[in-house]
């Protein structure tokens, strides 16, 4: 044991001489030549030589010291990285055990590696161990927030699914209501206009035109022949009863309804102005076809 200690001390003395002894002689030699040069310029003044020698030696010594500090720091950092890489487990190894056992194994591996580290790494041993312990604590603390984030994500997904499902249900309900409304309108058309339409073919044309108008408010109907003359008041009441149940006031406006009547019954509506046609509810209870106002929120007729 003593022999090993003596050898270590001898190696330290030798390294010190190599690092500082030889370069020190070179620095002093350079400073001596510089002082002689400057002294020659000042007429061999000894004070000038001394000041120049001290300044030159100090500057060169400082530069060499900084240079040695940089060179000494590079191997130390490399050794620290090597030690860190040697003690850190791979991802597969970390996944092979539970969190608690993994953390304990990592700390034990760190301590074993630190015990085997060379003396040059002693400065980094304590900081490396402290960083690893802090990382372990952070992993443990972050487990619960991760669970909360997962629960929040799951709740958001459920809400999104419920939202999409409800939107689809609402669309189906609206489409079903629209189809029921059209069917109710068709029953009303057949019941109301059958006594006045020329024949069954004309009645089918009338129903087809009404159905297409319900799908597209811009639909242009074909003329319909009547076997019994209806008044303009009857036809205005008839179209108003249908349009009110189609719902959209911005599409089935008074002008749209008036154009539809004039195109569908051009003979009857020939001599009446459009502004007069738009007065649909004029004398609502007069004529063969009367005004049938729908109940609030309902589309059914009251002809039965």
Image (cartoon, rainbow, N blue to C red):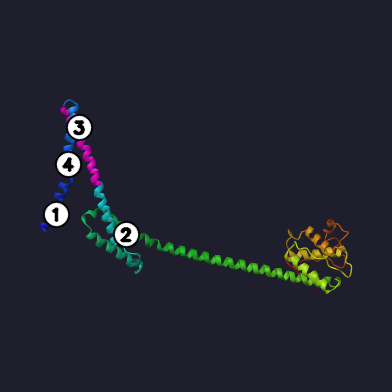
Give the extent of the magenta segment: 44-69
For marks 4 and 2 on the same chain, the one whose residue lies earlier in the sequence: 4
Q: Is residue 174 left or right of residue 141?
A: right
Residue density around tag 2, few if under 14, some if 14–19, many if 20 or more, within 10 Å: some
Residue density around tag 1, few if under 14, some if 14–19, many if 20 or more, within 10 Å: few
Q: Is residue 18 left or right of residue 127?
A: left
Total residue callouts:
4
Q: Give the Cα separation between the discs numbered 3 and 2.
A: 54 Å
Q: From this view, report whether residue 160 is shown above or below residue 50.
A: below
For marks 1 and 4 on the same chain, the one whose residue lies earlier in the sequence: 1
Q: From this view, report whether residue 109 is shown above or below residue 33.
A: below
Q: Give the Cα separation between the discs numbered 1 and 2.
A: 34 Å
- The mark found on residue 8 in the picture is 1
Task: Look at mark 4 in the image and give the residue it sits on.
Answer: 24
Tell me, yes or no, if residue 191 can be seen here.
no
| Residue projecting furthest to the top | 43
Please tell me which residue is depicted at 17% across the width and 40% down the height of the picture: 26
**Which residue is at the front of the view, 241 or 217?**
217
Q: Describe the element under mark 3 as helix, strand or loop.
A: helix
């Amino acid at each position: 044991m003593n022999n090993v200690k003596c050898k270590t001390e001898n190696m330290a003395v030798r390294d010190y001489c190599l690092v500082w002894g030889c370069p020190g002689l070179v620095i002093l030699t350079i400073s001596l030549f510089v002082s002689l040069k400057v002294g020659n310029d000042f007429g061999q003044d000894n004070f000038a030589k001394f000041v120049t020698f001290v300044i030159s030696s100090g500057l060169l010594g400082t530069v060499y010291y900084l240079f040695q500090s940089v060179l000494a720091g590079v191997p130390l950092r490399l050794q620290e990285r090597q030690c860190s890489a040697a003690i850190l487990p791979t991802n597969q190894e970390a996944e092979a055990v539970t969190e608690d056992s993994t953390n304990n194994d990592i700390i034990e591996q760190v301590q074993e590696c630190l015990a085997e580290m060379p003396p040059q790494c002693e400065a980094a041993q304590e900081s490396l161990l402290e960083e690893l312990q802090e990382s372990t604590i952070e992993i443990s603390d972050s487990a619960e927030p991760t669970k909360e984030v997962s629960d929040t994500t799951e709740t958001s997904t459920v809400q999104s699914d419920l939202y999409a499902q409800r939107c689809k249900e609402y669309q189906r309900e609206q489409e079903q209501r629209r189809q029921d409304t059209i069917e109710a309108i068709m029953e009303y058309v057949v019941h109301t206009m059958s006594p006045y339409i020329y024949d069954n073919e004309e009645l089918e044309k009338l129903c087809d035109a009404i159905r297409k108008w319900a799908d597209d408010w811009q639909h242009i109907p074909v003329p319909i022949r009547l076997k019994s003359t209806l008044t303009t008041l009857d036809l205005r009441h008839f179209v108003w009863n249908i349009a009110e149940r189609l719902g959209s006031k911005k599409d089935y406006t008074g002008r749209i309804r008036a154009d539809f009547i004039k195109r569908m019954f051009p003979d009857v509506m020939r001599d009446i102005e459009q502004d007069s046609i738009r007065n649909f509810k004029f004398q609502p209870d007069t004529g063969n076809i009367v005004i049938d106002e729908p109940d609030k929120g309902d589309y059914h007729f009251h002809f039965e």
